[in-house]
Amino acid sequence: MATYLVTGASGGIGVEYCRQITQRGDEAIAVCRSSSPELDKLGVRVETGIDITSDDAVADLVSRLQGKAIDVLINNAGILKRITLDNLDFDSIRQQFEVNALGALRVTAALLPNLHDGSKVIMMTSRMGSIDDNTSGSSYGYRMSKVAMSMAGKSLSHDLKPRGIAVGILHPGLVSTPMTNYSGISPKESVTGLLARIDELNLDNTGTFWHANGEVLPW
C-alpha cells in the first residue's frame, strides 16, 4: 500500500484524488485549511488547519506526521483570481504567488525527510503557466505564479534525482470545479488521467510538463 499526501484536498480535484487513491487500495492523507462534507465521507485521514503559506502551519503538519513515509506528495493546493491589465491588484497577484508557487515549495522542502528513494513529488500547475501556449494574455497572477511553480518543479527534478525522487509537473485539463465556474471535464476524468501520469513517472522522465491526457506541454 502506497501513501499519498494531497494538499488542497477539501474540494474538486483534491477530493477526487483522495477518492480514487483509496479506491486503488492505497492510503490518502488529505491536507487542507478546513475539511468538507464531501471529503469527510471518504473516511480518509484529514489534517486540517494547514495554511501552506505559513511556515508554522507547515511545521505543525510535519510534526503531526511523526516521520511517516510518503510515497507520493501531491502539491494540489492553489487559487485562481482573474486579474486583467485594466484591473491590476498586486496584493492578489502576490497572494497567488504565495499559495501556488511558494506554498508548494514550502511543503515539499518541509516534507523531504518523509520522502525516500522511489518517492514522487507532483506539482499541480496549469497550461495557463505555459509561456509558449499563452495566446490570450490576462490572468496575470495565476499565469505568473504557475510559471513559478513549474520552474520550482523543474529545479526540484534536478535536485531530487540523486535521492531517487522523481518530480512530475502536471496540468489537470480544464476541470469542472468552482474555480472554473464548472466548465470542462469532470474531476473523475481528470484525476484518472493524472494518476496514470503519476504511475508512469520515473527518474528517466522526471521534470516533464504533462497534460493529464499524456500530452507533453510546451514551456
Image: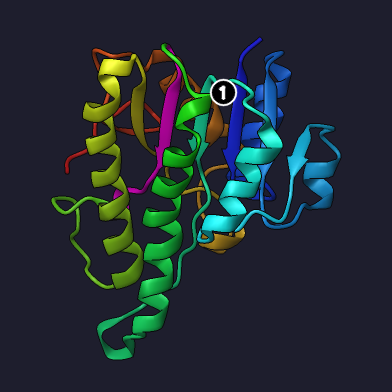
Q: How crowded is mark 1: few (under 14 residues within 10 Å), some or many (20 or more)?
A: many
Residue 132 vs residue 55, the one in the foreground? 55
Q: Quadrant of the C terminus?
A: top left
In this rendering, position of residue 26 left or right of residue 190: right
Q: Is residue 12 visible?
A: yes
Asked whether 94 or 178 is in front, the reply is 94
Image height check: is 196 above or below 35? Answer: above
The answer to whether residue 8 shows anywhere in this view is no
Q: Name the residue rendered at 77%, 34% in the picture.
A: 45
Residue 76 belongs to magenta span: no
Q: According to the image, what is the colour scheme of the structure?
A: rainbow
Q: In this view, does 134 lie above or below 95?
A: above
**View extreme (bottom): residue:** 86
Residue in view at x 30 percent, y 25 percent: 160
Place of residue 137 in the rendered image (x, y in percent of width and height, measured from the top left):
22, 69
Q: Quadrant of the N terminus?
A: top right
Q: How far across and down, in percent of the image, does residue 60 sit?
A: 65, 48
Q: In this view, does 205 lie to the left or right of 98?
A: left
Identify the element where label 1 is drawn: loop
Which residue does the image show at 37% across and 46% down from the upper left?
125
Residue 153, by quadrant, is top left
Left or right: residue 138 versus residue 24 is left
What are the residue bounds of the magenta stretch?
Answer: 118-128
Label tally = 1
Tag 1 residue: 70
Above or below, comparing residue 20 to residue 141 in the picture: above
The amino acid marked with disc number 1 is: Ile
